[in-house]
Structures are given as structure tokens and as C-alpha cells.
Amino acid sequence: MNDIDTILSIVENPTRRRILQALVREPHYPLQLSKELGISQQAVMKNLEIMEKEGLITGKKENSNKGPERTVYRPVSEFTITIDMRNGMFRTKMISPQSNRSNIENNENEDLDEIRTQISMLDGKIKELDLTRSELIDRRDKMIQRFMENASLVTDYEMRSLLYEMLDEPDWGASEISENLRLNEGLIADMLDRISEIFTKERDEQ
């Protein structure tokens, strides 16, 4: 699964989030989820079907020692989603894990307290990375805002949208910007010429 819009539509539902929280810990069958989460089995099945259809989880029939065969559900996708909303920036991004699980350290000989200590250390490193990321995004946002404030003479809405797009996606070329703004490349070239004239005139007058 790599459709961020579909994933966001799935996880916005609190019932589905609770179901996923249970499934990522260990596989569950519907009646088990219903009892554990205090949700009707009908509601559980409805949400499991939605998530299985979208490729987030999968169900497999397994034999039961206590009765008839039952369907056990488990996740089949892993991802991280970030949403950044700043003054000049709104961006959603999905990241899929790249690490090889065969390289995970063996904790077989460690007791519970040792593992909790290591997890706490890793959580601390993740928080540090989150703070560093937030600081970098803040610097990025301030650079965009400072430039746009200095470009106050560019008052045309479409030209300002073009400037924001060029700053927000610095690696994009004319074709990508044209597609995202739904403007032809010739019009974008004309707008850039007009923006350049405005900046040149302002610089000459200073």
C-alpha cells in the first residue's frame, strides 16, 4: 500500500485505529477484538473488511482448539506518515521502512528491565531526531517567509503562487511546477520574466 490519501482516510477513524493498535501487537480474530475493544462484532468485521480491501491487513483461516475454524487478521503494511503545517508549508509524506529485519539485535538473553532500558534509550534518540527535524523545518519556513516578505511588490496571486511553489519544491523543474499549478509552461515562463523584471526594477531603485 502506498496511497497516502487512502491510508489517511482509514486511520482517521478511531475504531480502526484501535483495531490496528491491537493487530500490530499480535494477530487477532474478530470475536477476540470485539471483546477486547468493547466493540460489536459487526462493527469489527465491517472495519476489518475495509482495511483488508485496501491492503492494510490480511485475514487467514486457522484451526481453533476451542471450536470451529476462524479467521485471524494481521497487518501486512508498515509505514510512517508525517504531516507538516507551517506558515508557508503544508506537506504530507509517507515513509516505508527500509531496514532488514534479519539485522535486528538478538534480545534472547536480556531480561525485561534491560530491554525496557534499551527501548527508553531508543525513544530518547527518536525524540532528539524529532526536535532536530522540527528545528530544520522551522528554519526552512522562515527562509520562505522572509523571501516572500521581500517580494511584496509581486502582488499578482498566480505569480506569488508560482514563487511559493518554486520555494516549496526547489528540486522541481518547469514541467513539475506546471503540472502541479495546472498552468502551461509558456505561461510560467512569462510569469518568471515578469517576476524578474519586478525584482530588477526594485533593485535598481534601491
Image (cartoon, rainbow, N blue to C red):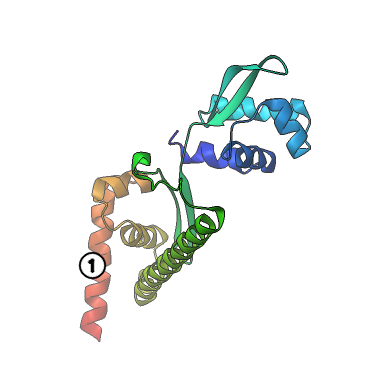
- Looking at the image, which residue is at 35% across and 39% down? 102
Locate the N terminus and report the quarter of the image it occupies.
Answer: top left
From the viewer's perspective, tell me whether residue 162 is left or right of residue 192. Answer: right
Nearest to the observer: residue 150 or residue 88: 88
- Looking at the image, which residue is at 66% across and 30% down? 47
Locate the C terminus and report the quarter of the image it occupies.
Answer: bottom left
Instruction: Indicate whether 91 appears above or below 1.
Output: below
From the viewer's perspective, tell me whether residue 136 is left or right of residue 82. Answer: left
x, y percentage for residue 24?
A: 56, 39
Quadrant hosting residue 138: bottom left
User: Which residue is denoted by mark 1 in the rendering?
Assistant: 196
From the viewer's perspective, tell me whether residue 14 is left or right of residue 159. Answer: right
Count of labels shown? 1
Q: Secondary structure at mark 1?
A: helix
x, y percentage for residue 21?
A: 61, 42
Q: Amino acid at mark 1?
A: Ser
- Looking at the image, which residue is at 28% across and 52% down? 188
x, y percentage for residue 75?
A: 53, 33
Nearest to the observer: residue 201 or residue 84: 84
Quadrant hosting residue 143: bottom left
Nearest to the observer: residue 164 or residue 32: 32
x, y percentage for residue 199?
A: 26, 73
- Looking at the image, which residue is at 46% across and 43% down? 79
Farthest residue to the front: give it: 109
Question: Dot 1: within a 10 Å radius of its alpha carbon, few (fewer than 14), some, or many (20 or more) residues?
Answer: few
Instruction: Indicate whether 186 appears above or below 139.
Output: above
Nearest to the observer: residue 182 or residue 69: 69
Farthest residue to the top: give it: 68
